[in-house]
Image: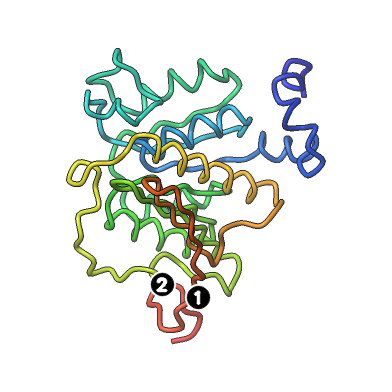
Amino acid sequence: MRDDQLLRYSRQIMLPEIDAAGQSHLANATVLIVGLGGLGSAASLYLTAAGVGHLVLVDFDKVDLSNLQRQIVHSNADIGRLKVESARDRLLALNPDIKLTLIDRQLSESEFAEWMSKCNVAIDATDNFETRFALNRASVQTRTPLVSAAAIRFEAQVSVFDPRNTESPCYRCLYAEDNQVDTTCTANGVMAPLLGIVGSIQASEAMKLIMQIGTTLQGKLMLLDILNMEWHQARLSKDPDCPVCRTTP
């Protein structure tokens, strides 16, 4: 590690749970981030700042004025640009050492699996069930930990699904695939800082998985009500009849 990198990450390296070894794990890690909206903005900024070596950014959307209330990786000058390109410029300005791979199109489930197989952790920062279910199936197929979150109005949830652990539930254990509820911010609205809080939690869970430290949200669903500032945590159990992650027919 170069002297300037030691200085950049010094406040993190001084933590005994992380140390130089943990920082090295981060530098050698690849994280897939699907979605560069509110959640993906916060997650990508903190993973970049913390020294994760390679981020694979997936988003086919363009920056719109209505995004800027919460999608802090983009700026007013980026309106009309692809979000992956806007994010690239902001992240490289924050940390020029980071490697970025940009994917500006919608991926198929097999392509998600292909990219996940090359990553240490995947972050689901999307806003629709179809993509979440596809990411979950790819996660189980490749045994790649998935940090999943959703936020709407004043409420959010976040969890970790780690198929390397046979006792870990998957996203399909939590939601049935016939769920047709529109959970987008466009349709329901959202308070801006909520996305930053939860996206930051996704970044911290991804880092803990990479460095293998602490206790993650595997098997737990963390719920936040920012209007009343209440945190709740629910236990998640593996569904023995889950069509995605069950181990026996």
Q: CA distance from mark 1 to mark 2?
A: 8 Å
Q: Is residue 98 left or right of residue 141?
A: right
How far across and down, in percent of the image, does residue 107 sit?
32, 46
**In the rendering, at what x and y percent does residue 152 appear?**
30, 48
Residue at 57% in and 25% down: 98
Pointer 1 local density, CA inside 10 Å: few below 14, some 14–19, many at least 20: some
Write the residue at 44% across / 57% down. 223
How was the colour assigned to the protein in this rendering?
A: rainbow
Exactly how many numbered labels are in the figure? Answer: 2
* For residue 116, side relative to residue 104 (left or right): right
- Give the answer, above or below, for where 84 lies relative to 243: above
The residue carrying pointer 2 sits among few (fewer than 14), some (14 to 19) or many (20 or more) residues within 10 Å by Cα, namely many
Mark 1 vs 2: CB contact within 8 A: yes
Q: Amino acid at mark 2?
A: Cys
Instruction: Identify which amino acid the numbered label 1 is placed on.
Output: Ser
Residue at the image position 40 percent from the left and 31 percent from the top: 102
Would you name the residue on which mark 2 appears?
173
Q: Quadrant of residue 59?
A: top left
Task: Say above or below: 159 vs 34.
Answer: below
Tell me where residue 248 appears, x and y as whole percent: 48, 85
Q: Residue at x 34, y 61 (%)?
A: 133
Q: Quadrant of the C terminus?
A: bottom left
Q: In what element is the residue under mark 2?
A: helix
Residue bearing the label numbered 1: 237
Q: Position of residue 11 (x, y in %)?
A: 74, 27
